[in-house]
Amino acid sequence: MRYWLMKSEPDEASIDHLAEAPHHTLPWTGVRNYQARNFMRDMMQVGDGVLFYHSSCPEPGIAGLAEVSSTAYPDPTQFDKKSPYYDPKSSQETPRWLLVDVVFKKKIPLIPLAALREHEELKDMRVLVKGNRLSITPVTEAEWRFITKRLV
């Protein structure tokens, strides 16, 4: 089992959207970074834990817990010419972009980025590294345990 921090802009897909979605599940569309795509394609497995992180908002932070609920499959937004995630270089035969489905587990009081920085146990978390812009980052088992046992 692995653990992940997955960032989403709350006006596009928030923890509340996930909680209210049919079957409490959403496809993680719109990832357009090869490293993040490769995490989904090569490493994510059904049952992996997810820290659902609100980004690009007035107060970014962890807003809930979720779980990976599918293996990777082609992101349909890459084929939709009306989508901001459309990729004209991608084809149905050789899709460039993948996604996984994520299922809601729990909404939590927001744990802001500043609060994460206060804990020595989390000092190496990838989301706290200056300049990190990846929308999906691995979380160690120790970081997951600390956050879910001490901060949630």
Image: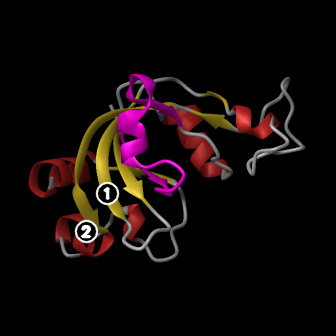
Q: Are marks 1 and 2 in contact (CB under 8 Å)?
A: yes
Residue 115 seen in the figure: yes
Q: Nearer the viewer, residue 68 or 41?
A: 68
Q: Position of residue 67 (x, y in %)?
A: 35, 33
Question: Residue extending furthest front?
Answer: 20
Decide: is 133 above or below 25.
Answer: below
**Residue at mark 1:** 62
Q: Point out the tag, 1 or 2, that comes first from the N-terminus.
A: 1
**Residue at mark 2:** 116
Q: Which mark is residue 148?
A: none
Please identify the quarter of the rendering in which residue 99 is found: top right
Report the residue at 61% width, 40% height from top: 29
Decide: is 61 above or below 65.
Answer: below
User: Which three-letter amino acid code belongs to the residue tagged 2?
Assistant: Leu
User: Which three-letter amino acid code belongs to the residue tagged 1?
Assistant: Ile
Disc 1 is placed on an element classified as: strand
Q: Position of residue 111 (x, y in %)?
A: 25, 63
Residue 4 seen in the figure: no
